[in-house]
Image (tube, grey):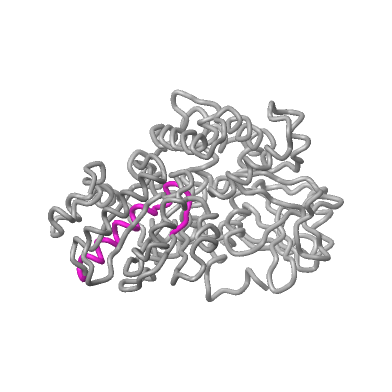
């Protein structure tokens, strides 16, 4: 194995010391909050074939692979496992050569495990992997590919449709998962509200959660690391950083406001709407941006010709993108605190946070009528409209549309449920907590 991969494969030197030497596992041990991803229990042990693990950048994919390796080493000889961080691989020719060489050196009388982390960082990676399958070299191999790009699943289905496979997805922690990680139990409503205020800062990203636990702030290094990675990855995808910055700035300027690609083309130096759409498609596939369509109520689908709402998928992503576009010496104090103390701006962040949480489980849209309805999710062949407010007063104009629906709900900043003109109101953090409670069907009925 090439020396550039040695640090990530310390098990080949001494399997007994793997958990003490591996950089990801060492970093994990230093964290206050360590999340146990349930998907790890679903990873197979003795199943040759092709498997994928998708999730946004910094969602924990690499750490999951290392934890899986740690489990495998209890039953598998160390020389049967190989890990490749693909961001260290220049092109698909090198990818094929490195993997082929490694497989040929691994035991030939048993299942072997080849882990390619962030495989889509290698342009045309498929051209490096497909020849290995075509040559029969992968018959005894369990190949695990990871990517932040959700299109990985479709790409592997196209190239290897007949192989035994399994596809896994992880996301940044939901609000409920975050609360359980930090507290271990369901808190009282007042504590739930305090945890939601914290969630608006760190979101579901474990590095950010642990940064808050350690320093009571988000370290600027987190934002710099994320920005550096994003700009580099964008260039690898054949796109331009300056256009990326324009697109991200447009999201911030039109946050949660309906707009069309044509309208954006008049504002940006990117003068073709299709190019703008391509950038948004890339950011969506990376789990950074959520594009919300208006609901066609008759078909329960998005209205393609109407304006779209743009938002980031997680509070941490919002803050990281703001730090990229508007750098500050101390982003936490100068920008994040200021935003959260501004009712109008924080309300937009809250709204996008709620929408993105629902979007994990349901098709979601907004409703455009006499007034907007922030969220309509589709479940059981019906749409369920929800108005979201993070102020203590709800203007009458905001109720015009939601009042038309007998199954409408309003999520509010108050700690008690109630009724506004026959529409049920609920504490917003409590509604998010119950969203994932399999024993509570209130959110769906």
Q: Is residue 55 left or right of residue 20?
A: right
Counting from the top left corner in percent of width and height, residue 254 is at: 69, 36
Counting from the top left corner in percent of width and height, residue 382 is at: 75, 70
Q: Nearer the viewer, residue 395 or 81?
A: 81
Q: Is residue 55 magenta?
A: yes
Counting from the top left corner in percent of width and height, residue 282 is at: 58, 45
Q: Is residue 110 above or below residue 8?
A: below
Most distant residue in the top direction:
329
Q: Is residue 323 magenta?
A: no
Q: Nearer the viewer, residue 84 or 260?
A: 84
Most distant residue in the front direction:
135
Q: Is residue 59 left or right of residue 384?
A: left
Instruction: Give the magenta-colored segment's residue range.
Output: 53-75
Residue found at x 53% / y 76%: 439
On the question of residue 347 being in view, the answer is no
Residue found at x 23% / y 51%: 9
On the question of residue 251 being in view, the answer is yes
Most distant residue in the right direction:
370
Q: Nearer the viewer, residue 141 or 24?
A: 141
Q: What number of labels is visible? A: 0
Give the image quarter of residue 405. bottom right
Most distant residue in the bottom direction:
439
Give the image quarter of residue 260. top right
Q: Is residue 335 left or right of residue 95?
A: right
Give the position of the C terminus as an image quadrant.
Answer: bottom right
Q: Is residue 300 left or right of residue 441?
A: right
Q: Nearer the viewer, residue 425 or 6?
A: 6
């Amino acid at each position: 194995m090439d020396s550039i991969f040695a640090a990530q494969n310390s098990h080949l030197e001494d399997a007994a010391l793997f958990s003490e030497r591996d950089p990801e596992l060492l970093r994990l041990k230093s964290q206050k909050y360590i999340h146990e991803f349930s998907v790890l229990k679903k990873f197979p042990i003795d199943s040759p074939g092709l498997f994928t693990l998708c999730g946004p950048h910094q969602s924990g994919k690499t750490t999951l692979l290392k934890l899986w390796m740690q489990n495998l080493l209890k039953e598998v000889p160390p020389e049967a496992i190989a890990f490749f961080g693909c961001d260290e691989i220049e092109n698909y020719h090198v990818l094929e050569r490195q993997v082929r060489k490694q497989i040929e050196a691994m035991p030939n009388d048993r299942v072997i495990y080849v882990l390619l982390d962030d495989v889509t960082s290698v342009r045309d990676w498929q051209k490096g992997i497909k020849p290995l399958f075509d040559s029969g070299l992968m018959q005894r191999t369990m190949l695990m590919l990871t990517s932040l790009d959700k299109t990985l699943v479709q790409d592997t289905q196209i190239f290897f449709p007949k192989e035994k496979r399994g596809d896994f997805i992880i996301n940044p922690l939901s609000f409920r998962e975050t609360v359980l990680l930090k507290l271990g139990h369901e808190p009282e409503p007042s504590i739930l509200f305090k945890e939601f205020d914290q969630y608006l800062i760190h979101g579901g990203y474990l590095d950010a959660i642990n940064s808050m636990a350690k320093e009571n702030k988000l370290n600027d290094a987190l934002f710099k690391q994320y920005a550096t990675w994003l700009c580099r990855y964008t260039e690898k995808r054949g796109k331009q950083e300056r256009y990326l910055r324009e697109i991200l700035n447009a999201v911030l300027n039109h946050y949660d406001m309906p707009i069309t690609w044509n309208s954006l083309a008049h504002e940006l130096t990117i003068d073709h709407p299709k190019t703008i759409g391509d950038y948004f498609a890339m950011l969506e596939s990376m789990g950074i941006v959520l594009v919300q369509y208006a609901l066609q109520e008759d078909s329960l689908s998005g209205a393609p010709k109407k304006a779209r709402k743009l938002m980031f998928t997680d509070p941490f992503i919002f803050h990281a993108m703001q730090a990229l576009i508007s750098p500050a010496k101390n982003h936490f104090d100068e920008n994040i605190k200021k935003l959260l103390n501004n009712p109008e701006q924080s309300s937009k962040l809250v709204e996008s946070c709620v929408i993105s949480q629902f979007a994990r489980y349901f098709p979601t849209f907004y409703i455009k009528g006499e007034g907007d309805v922030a969220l309509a999710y589709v479940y059981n062949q019906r749409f369920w409209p929800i108005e979201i407010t993070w102020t203590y007063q709800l203007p009458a104009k905001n109720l015009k549309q939601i009042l038309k629906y007998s199954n409408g709900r309003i999520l509010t900043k108050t700690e008690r449920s109630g009724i506004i003109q026959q529409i049920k109101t609920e504490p917003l953090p409590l509604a998010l907590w119950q969203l994932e409670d399999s024993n509570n069907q209130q959110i769906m009925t």
